[in-house]
Structures are given as C-alpha cells and as structure tokens.
Amino acid sequence: MLRRKSSTLLLLTAERIVRADFSGGRLTALRQQPRPDADDLAMLVDSALRLGGRCRRTVWILTTDVWVQAVPLEAGATRAASAQELSQALAFEAESLSGIGAFESVLAHRSLESDGFHRHFWVVQMPVWQLDQVGEAISEHGGRLGGIAHPAGLPRAVGSQSPGSSWQRIELWPDCVAAVRSTAGKTPEVQLVNSSPAQEGWKTTLQMWLESNPIADQRALMISRPGDELRGMGDETEIIDLNDEASLKGWLTAWNESLGFREPAVPLLQPAAEPLSVQSRVVMAAAFAALVAAGCWAIETASRAKLESAGEETRQLEQRAEEFAAFDGEIRSRNERLTKRSDENRKLAAALDTYEAVAEAQKRRLAVLLAGVADLRPEHLVIRRIEQNAGTVTISGAHLDPNSVHDFAARLNRRVRPLGWTVEPTPQEASKKTTTGKPWTFTMRLSNSAMTSEDLWAGRNGALEPVARGATR
C-alpha cells in the first residue's frame, strides 16, 4: 500500500549531499551541495538537513556509506530457514566481507535469482550505533528516521522508460554495479554485481543476465559520477546522468514513491521501534481506559437489553404457561363432566331398557296369565272369577279334587313368575253340598314380586311366546 505522506529524502554520496522535500508525493524543494570533508554519517545527515528549513515528519536516506553486496548462501541451508534465521545467517556470512560484527550490525536483505546451488541475497548492512546516531540527528531537526537504503537498484522506470513497456537499466555506483529489467506487466527484477565500474568483469556477468530476457524496448545507463558514461556497454539507448538536475528530480521522485510502500522492494535499514514516552503512555492508557469503559458500557447496555428481552420472553412464557394450565384444567373438568354424563347416559339407557321391558311385560302379563290359566286348569276345576285390584290378581273357583288346586297353583306360579307375580298359598273351603264335602271352593291370589333383568329380557325376547300361543289354542 502506498503512503502519500510528506517526507524528506536525503542522498549522500562520495561527491555531494542532496535534500529533497516532498508533500503528498510531489517534489516541492531540491537543495544540494558538495559533500563536506567528513566521514561521520550522522554529521552528513545533519549537514544535509541544514540545507533547508524544518524537515518533514519522515526522513528517508539514500547513501553509499552503507555496505552493500550480493551474498550467496547454499540453497539447501536456506530452504527451511525462518526469516530471523536467514537474517542471522546472512549477518555471519557478511561479517567477514564487511568487517561489521554480526551482533553489532543491523542488516536488511532481498532475494535475488538463484543459480540452483546457491541463493543470492541483496544485502545492506551498517553498525547499530551508527543507525542510532543518525536517528538522533534527525530527531533534533523534528523528524523521524523512516529508513536507510543504498541508492543502487531502484526497481522502477526512470527517465524516458515507461512502466508499461519492456526496458533494461544498468546503474554504475562507486562500490557496485546494479542492473534492473522489466517485462511489460511484470514486477521489475534486480541483479547486483560486487564490482566497481572500473573493473570490466561486471559486463560479462550482466550481459548474460540481460540476454536471458532479451525483449527490451530500451536499455539505459545511469551514472552518478561524471565520466562514468564511458564505462557502459556501448549499446545503451539513453544516458541518465544524476548530475543533471531534471534527471535527479525524476530519480528521487521515483525513489520516494518506492519507499512510500509499507513493504519496499529494496533492502531498507530501519530503526527499532522507539519506546513510548511517559506522556504518550498516559495518553494511550487513558484512551485504552476510555475504550474499555466504552466497551463495558456497550456490553452492559447490550446485556441489560438482552436481560430485559429475556425477562419479557419469560413473562410471556409464564403467561402462556398459565393459559395452558387453565386450558388443561378446563379440559380435565370437561373430561370429568363428560365421563359423569357418559355414566349417567349409560344408567339412563339401562333404566330405559328396564322400563321398556317392564312396560312390555305389563302389557302382556294379563294375556299371558289368562292363557296360562286356560292352558293349565285341571279338568275338574272351574274358574268363576278373575279380578285385579292394584297389583294383586284374585282367581276364584271350585273343584272336585283338592290336590288339583295345589298342582294348578304350583304350575301357574312357574308360568307367571317371569311376569312379576307370585302365587300365594291357596285356601280351600268345602261347600258341603255332598256327604264328602264336594265341591270345594278356592281363592287364589297373585301378588307382585321383584322381576329380575333376566325375567324382563326373557319376556322381551319372546320366551313367553309359546305360552301365548298355547293360550290362543
């Protein structure tokens, strides 16, 4: 992500010091002078910042005073190494080359192409104490060190090179030679040769690397010192001379844009995170406390709202439970009433059946009685009168044989028993019209008796029909 903040960019080479101020990515001021006779990097930074007024908040530094080289490591040793382990390995490897102790240095690196046996890394290194001094010098001018890089290997189009085209650029610096190439639509690639421009061996190395991707509309040669244009390969289509102010402005603007990314594509030495001041800590603590308080308030408010909602739901559920309980009680009450009414209906149905049976029996009992009397009467027995008074029937008559009356009464009792009558003992009285007392008179009483359900249903289902038919006969 590109950061479009205001910044100050310093260029420190063996010949000059340059200060460029940017606002919103646009170059607003450019000042330069020959390099002072000093080797202390912090003093050079202070001198460059004094070329103008107050510096911007962020200060970037491009300088050839840092150590830069392409460092090889065995490919197998780096395959499973973490970023920290890789940095430590490069620091120990570079110690014998730069003379800077691995534990006393700060190092940044970017990966270059591999030859299959070794991985090559673009390494920039400087002592930690020197980085700290530079940071202090910048803070005295009201700025903050953003990072320090070597000016070689800018991975962006410069001069007449177009970002959307294919191009190649060779950069000649006092301590190294860099080559940058880009194919249309792809990220620029960088190659670094550990050689000064005065040595001709770098040409063979870079020629092979550039020819591995020969499609290029332009090949430019960029120089930082007068006279280095004669050290090129001779087939360049453009010379970018940083001693020319217009070329310098374009190149510095491109560097400012490249450094503006959160993850620059070049090795960038950056200071360790500064501890917060007491005032900043107090402000951050207050802000954090406010955030915590706001969070607690939000949680409490949300919890209260949820509790109220849960309480309302609970009340609604309790109300529904009460309604369901009332409905359940009503259902049980109605079921009890329904059961009671069912029992009453069964009793009424049984009583109705009994009533119908009794009514039918009452309709038929007299007819059955008369038929039974006619059917069962002995030959020497005469029926004179049959009377009914309330529930009692009286049969009067005369006979010639006393035993026949008893037999007739017993047989008639069996016949009318299902009809609810009981034949009482029959008294007899002699008429004394003959010497033997014949004929005898009798009075037979039939009184109501309890009728069983079997008697009623037997009469209702036609058990007495044969008697009725016999009476008819």
Image (cartoon, grey):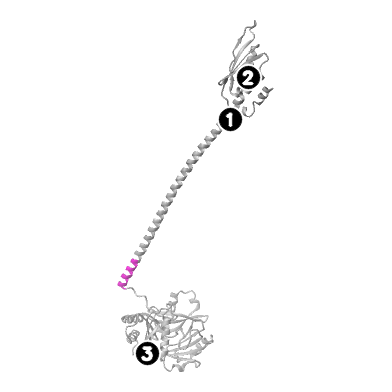
Give the image location of residue 314, x and y in percent: 42, 52
Magenta span contains residue 283: yes
The label number, if any, that marks residue 23 in the structure image: none
Which residue: 42% across, 49% down? 319
Question: To which quarter of the image does residue 409 belong?
Answer: top right
Q: Earlier in the sequence, mark 3 or mark 2?
A: 3
Q: Is residue 454 visible?
A: no
Location of residue 69 with respect to 328 vertically, above or below: below
Q: Residue furthest left?
A: 279
- Per the model, the C-alpha gap separating discs 1 and 3 is 138 Å
The label number, if any, that marks residue 356 in the structure image: 1
Q: Is residue 317 visible?
A: yes
Q: Which quarter of the image is occupied by the C terminus?
A: top right
**Overall secondary structure of the magenta stretch?**
helix
How dense is the environment of label 1, judged by Cα within 10 Å: few (below 14), some, or many (20 and up)? some
Give the image location of residue 245, x and y in percent: 40, 90
Q: Which residue is mark 3?
A: 16
Query: What is the magenta range?
Result: 277-290
Q: Which residue is mark 2?
A: 412
Q: Is residue 279 left or right of residue 154?
A: left
Which residue: 54% across, 35% down? 345
Disc 1 on helix, strand or loop? helix
Q: Is residue 209 left or right of residue 4?
A: right
Give the image location of residue 233, x and y in percent: 49, 92
Of 177 and 431, nearer the camera is 431
Question: To which quarter of the image does residue 100 belong?
Answer: bottom left
Q: Residue furthest top?
A: 435
